[in-house]
Amino acid sequence: MVTVPLDTPDAQVARKRLRDLIVEKQREAEGMESPKAMREAQKTSLSELRTDYRRYLESRRLSKGYVRDTVKRLERMAVEIGWHTLADVRADAFERWFAGLTTSAKTNREYQLSARAFLNWLVRMELLERNPLAKLDLVSSRGREVRPSRAFSDDELRALFALANTRTLFFQALFYTGARVAEVAALCWADLTLTLDASAAAVFRASTTKARIERVVPLHPGLVRELLKLRALSDVSGRVFARAPSRKELFRDLDAAGIERRDTLGRVVHRHAFRKTARTFAVRCGVSERVCDAVLGHANPNRMGTRYTDVSGLPLNDWTKLPWLGRGDAQPDAQKANNSEAAREILAKLTELLCRVSPSTFSEVNSEKTGENENGRGDRIRTYDLLVPNQALYQAKLHPDGGWAGEGVRSGVSIAAFILGANHANFPDLRRAFGRPFATDLRGEM
């Protein structure tokens, strides 16, 4: 049994009100009439509903810029179309206004998305029966960009990073972490592990990332060195950067570095171009697409390769393959010392193994005939030439600091691998020392 207050002492009035209430509920149940809350909402001011919608967006902890821009679009639509109450919202009125917009396709799409999201929220709140704009086609912005972006070139980044100002390190952090401007600006010193080995990394907290997912990005040795210099002069309890450089400041730096903002194809560079450039350079340096996704936070959870990949097992340190384009040497002194010591160990082991080989091994003459093959040609005994190892040893002695090792110890030992390219049967000691095992852990095998 349900008790309904009728708020009247008159029995006839009470019976009428009860009868009207029953009829109303029956019509609502049969779909002949909208619920009372929806009918009353039709008379509600859109300004009041926008205020409630703003509070809802803020409660979801969305960025202030997103909330501000969304509400501004809704306000502009209401004023220019003439929407005062919810009952005024109609698809035909929106389409007439939308057809007169002179903004870019991307901006037009943003207006559509903002209006749809607002009306869908009203539907979920049961203040609107259906979204009147749901059936309108969304504008596609693909191929219609007013300012298509491009990546920086190597020379452009070198010129920009050569500028001596306080903004250069921020731009370097954008490039070498592949992070967004707001994410780098939110970095605190506590988020950074500034060591001189492969454990150097930056942690972008979930509360600061666009996807609200924490991610860890390995730090390039050159960037670590610059950050250590800044930390020595900073308050380590606060943020790394006081603020993010503005668009105008970036444009001034581009002019100072002699970089054209717009190329001959009409493509432009801006603050987000560092992120695009980072991925471009990483792929060029052999970093896998999956590692790029993990570092940049582009992973789609619905994609098969993402769902069945354990990020902790990915070689994220491959991200540091990006070339150092800033001033000075990318390797800290401790790392160079380690590489130098490892290079000397490699040289000693290589010399020892080469000395084990009997000189008679190389006395055979290449032109010695061993008979005729089925084609009538004489088979030749192919002997190994000591020219390559001699050159390798010579270069190593000229550069005892490990300079011959190229990009670290791994590339240095590749000289030994190159020496073994002939894979001659007379060199079992060399094959055992510099064969397949050393590819995974060079110093460990030696």
Image (spheres, rainbow, N blue to C red):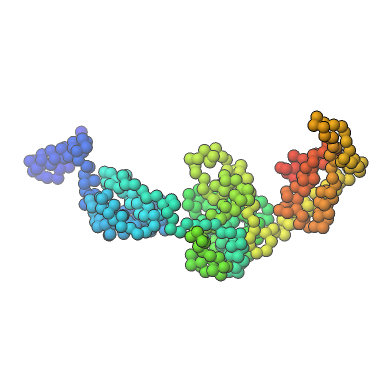
- Classify residue 324 as left or right of residue 436: left
| Residue found at the far top of this picture | 374
**Can you tell which quarter of the image residue 67 is in?**
bottom left
| Residue found at the far front of this picture | 376
Indicate the position of residue 403 as horizontal and vertical percent values.
76, 57
User: What residue sits 21% from the left and 52% below the top?
Assistant: 43
- Position of the N terminus, as image quadrant, is top left
- Classify residue 67 as left or right of residue 24: right
Indicate the position of residue 23 as horizontal and vertical percent values.
15, 37
Indicate the position of residue 245 as horizontal and vertical percent values.
51, 65
User: What residue sits 48% from the left and 64% below the top?
Assistant: 247
Against 389, is 32 above or below? above
**Can you tell which quarter of the image residue 433 is in?**
top right
- Asked whether residue 348 appears in the rendered view, the answer is no
Against 425, is 317 above or below? below
Indicate the position of residue 381 as horizontal and vertical percent values.
85, 37
- Position of the C terminus, as image quadrant, is top right
